[in-house]
Amino acid sequence: FAVGGEGSVYEGRGWENVGAHAVSYNVKSIGICMIGDFVENLPPQDQMESLKKLIATGVELGYISPNYKLIGHRQVSATECPGQALFNEISTWEHFTPAL
């Protein structure tokens, strides 16, 4: 999935197909790309709300466990993704997992 700055959600491989977002984690995770550069600034509010709604929808539909672990791409791949500002924000969310 990808979430645009205006809050639109784009389906890539969807819920039922294995993504190619994080080697060794693809089969046990859902990849969500936040479109933009979030090194210094957070995504717009509409984009953040759509991200939260997408995760909640995945839980509601049974594709994401209610006890899911939220991680940033950088925790499993050599990348700065999702950007320091966004990483700092998601690290305050209830399901964020600092270490796997």
Image (cartoon, rainbow, N blue to C red):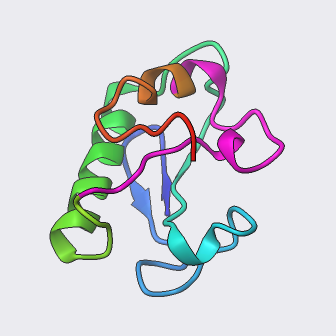
**Residue at the extreme right of the image, as rendered:** 78
Which of the two residues, 95 or 49, is positioned nearer the viewer here?
95
Q: What percent of the width, then of the height, locates residue 94?
A: 28, 34
Between 43 and 77, the residue placed more toward the observer is 77
- In the picture as drawn, the residue positioned furthest to the bottom comes out as 16
Q: Is residue 43 magenta?
A: no
| Chief secondary structure of the magenta portion | loop
Q: Is residue 10 above or below residue 80?
A: below
Q: Is residue 34 left or right of residue 47?
A: right
In the current view of this chain or complex, which residue is farthest to the front? 100
Q: Magenta residues?
A: 67-86
Q: Residue at x 61, y 25 (%)?
A: 38
Percent x, y for residue 73? 65, 46
In the displayed structure image, the side of residue 24 where residue 10 appears, left or right: left
Q: How many marks?
A: 0
> Can residue 90 be seen at all in this image of the molecule?
yes
